[in-house]
Amino acid sequence: PRMRARPCLPLSTRLPRLTRAPAQLLRRAASSQDKGDDPLKPDGDARLDRLWPGRAVTEAEEILASAPLPHGFEAAAPSKKARVFARSLRQRQAAQSANRAFLPLEMSAIIDLFDDYAGPARQLDRDGLRALLASVGERPDDATLEELFHQADVDSSGAIDLDEFLHASDALLASNPARCILVVGGPGSGKGVLCRRLVDECDVSHVSCGDLLRSEVEADTPLGREVAGIMLRGELVSSALIVTLLRRRMRSFGGRRLLLDGFPRSRDNAIDFEAQCGRPELALHLVCDEEKMLERILRRAQTEGRADDTRKAAVRRIAVYRQQSEPTLEWLRASRVPIVELDSSGSREEMWSGLKAIGRLMRNIVI
């Protein structure tokens, strides 16, 4: 059945009608997949649009956000699965209209980046574009900015809408990630464990700064030979060096949301990163007892055989982290980078549950 919004009907009558379609949409999509069809192909789009027009989805969300649910209709709100499917469909349609084939993990990060800098009309003016580019480490001069803006503003309206931004994002982002999330914590605090799970379950990408340095050592490059001694002593590699290596690696993840595992390790790292790569979206700070960190490092030495996981190097690394962490976190706070603290002294599941609790709190506004 078609869904037609009827302003004359009271909310208690309209709400079930507006929220019935998601179940029909999901059943129809599942049926199409069972038959080997793609429900998001052009003919599938037409079928879905008849079931769940984009305007009706928006109206349902506005109703739910602007007024309390009437008694007896609490269960009528769209399910999480339906909301996720609606967002996925809108993103796919936006990508199709921009004539660009996006990967799912690129799409959400690019749209989030656009929304952070677009005005109330969901459009970018020149100042918004300048601020957006600075957030990914690109700072063009006035002439270059004007040229980029002119190329992206296809309809010459004086503003860049989402479709135009998606179409021009390759040129605008210049292979930079759309969003970067810092994952900071002491050695053995569980950064790698958390990042691997986020990659598996949340469609994000991941770069480990420690692995980046170890790969240089294993390749026995001149840089790697210099780095090897520093790591064995449990000391920090120079900020200019690690940020340069990191920025080079980050360009492999253009348009994506990227986790930076074990970075920044010092206040200088944070300052150099902001100057070269822009302001990060978020920092996850893993708080862990030092004895627990040492225990984990020594256990990891037995299973993974990492050269820098000796007791002497581990004690030194923990001491360096203790000395460097607070100035680094203070700089991030002063730069208005949101910091989320997670207790990682317990089990992996306990740490994951803490992060999920934040997601559950915010899910109605981010999905």
Image: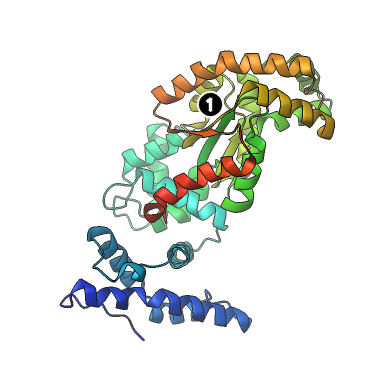
Q: Position of residue 104 (x, y in %)?
A: 55, 58
Q: How far across and how far down the image is residue 123, in percent?
A: 32, 51
Depicted 40 relative to depicted 362: above or below:
below
**Is 348 positioned to the left or the right of 135 in the image?**
right
Q: Quadrant of residue 74?
A: bottom left
Residue extending farthest bottom: 1
* Left or right relative to 78: residue 41: right
Residue 32 vs residue 346, the one in the foreground = 346
Residue indicated by mark 1: 273
Horizontally, residue 307 falls left or right of residue 22, namely: right
Q: Position of residue 337 (x, y in %)?
A: 43, 31
User: 214 or 309, which lies in front?
Assistant: 309
On the image, the x and y values in percent for residue 237 come to 67, 18
Residue 205 visible from this viewpoint? yes
Colour mapping used in the image:
rainbow
Q: Quadrant of the N terminus?
A: bottom left
Q: Which corner quadrant holds the C terminus?
A: bottom left
How many labels, in total?
A: 1
Asked if one can make out residue 237 in the rendered structure from this viewpoint, the answer is no
Q: Quadrant of residue 234?
A: top right
Q: Secondary structure at mark 1?
A: helix
- Residue located at (46% from left, 62% from top): 84
Comparing 72 with 171, the one in front is 72
Q: From this view, report whether residue 349 is shown above or below residue 64.
A: above
**Residue at image coords 36%, 69%:** 75
Number of residues whose C-alpha sits closer than 10 Å to that of mark 1, classed few (under 14), some (14–19) or many (20 or more): many
Amino acid tagged 1:
Phe
